[in-house]
Image (spheres, rainbow, N blue to C red):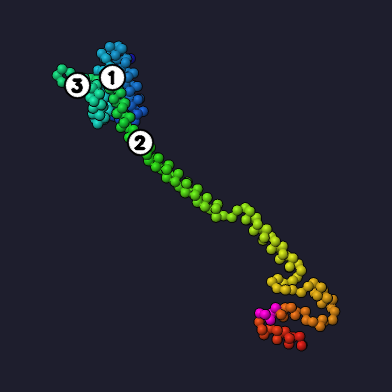
Amino acid sequence: MYTVDDLIKVAKQQAKEGISSYRDYKAYLAKFTLILKYLVKNEHINKDDDAGLLFLSAFSTESQRSIKRTLINKNQLPKAKDGSNKAPKWEDLTKAAETEVQVDKGYTNFSSFSKSTRIMQKDLDLKKGDGKRREQMLKESPSNKEVEQKLQEVQQELATLKQQIKNGAPTGYNRQGPSEKQEFNRGNARPSTPLYEAQNCFIAREKDTLPINAQKQQKT
């Protein structure tokens, strides 16, 4: 079903596409392992370890060096008698590769997370500021009780003004009673006391010359 060429093609194709995320790594590992197990089972390859260098070739040069350093630090990269490196165990190689992908790609993810966190914090600060402004506006705005009281006062003033207009009397100073007005309207004789005496007294307090004019008017 599979041949060694199929395994080589998978490694070369992944090297072209690159391994830019943990998902890419897991997909590559699944395809490579599927073919590798078939080849080992059918004795096309002696053991999994023999395909380690081919599997590693799909990674970038920098990642390959990092994976090798991890294996060396853990004493998982055996040496041959001539001093050359032997292929590591398949399990050790895949774990080191997975660690490399998580560390390398996790840095980018952490940076993105930090940026997202800063944006969220800024948004929260803005909302908190809006909340404080709303609280200040609520404190400064009149309460419902104050508004209702003010409305009642305005309504009372309007009612008083309407009553004054209905009676036909001017507002803002003393006015004659309704009986005097009715008596004058019936055409009765002119009263001996001037009807506007109260007004003259009021005007006299405002301007001294007006009472003289009023007296001249009475003589005529």
The residue positioned farthest toward the top in the image shown: 42
Q: In which quarter of the image is residue 194?
A: bottom right
Label 3 and label 2: CA atoms lie apart by 35 Å
Label 3 and label 1: CA atoms lie apart by 14 Å
Residue nearest the viewer, comparing 54 with 146 = 146
The image position of residue 78, as x and y in percent, is: 21, 20
The answer to whether residue 85 of the structure is visible from this angle is yes
Residue 90: image tag: 1
- Residue topped by disc 3: 85
Q: Quadrant of residue 113?
A: top left
Residue span colored magenta: 202-206
Q: Amino acid type of disc 1? A: Trp
Residue in the image at 59% along x and 55% along y: 142
- Crowding near pointer 3: few (<14 within 10 Å), some, many (20+)? few
The residue positioned farthest toward the left in the image shown: 82
Q: Amino acid type of disc 3? A: Asn
The answer to whether 39 appears left or right of 195 in the picture is left
The answer to whether 129 appears left or right of 101 in the picture is right
Q: From the image, which quarter does the C terminus lie in? A: bottom right
- Residue topped by disc 2: 110
173 relative to 97, above or below? below
Q: Point out the frontmost of discs 3 and 2.
A: 2
The answer to whether residue 185 of the structure is visible from this angle is no
In primary-sequence order, the first of circles 3 and 1 is 3
171 relative to 45, above or below? below
Residue in the image at 74% along x and 73% along y: 175
In primary-sequence order, the first of circles 1 and 2 is 1
Label 1 and label 2: CA atoms lie apart by 29 Å
Q: Amino acid type of disc 2? A: Phe
Number of numbered labels in the structure image = 3
In primary-sequence order, the first of circles 3 and 2 is 3
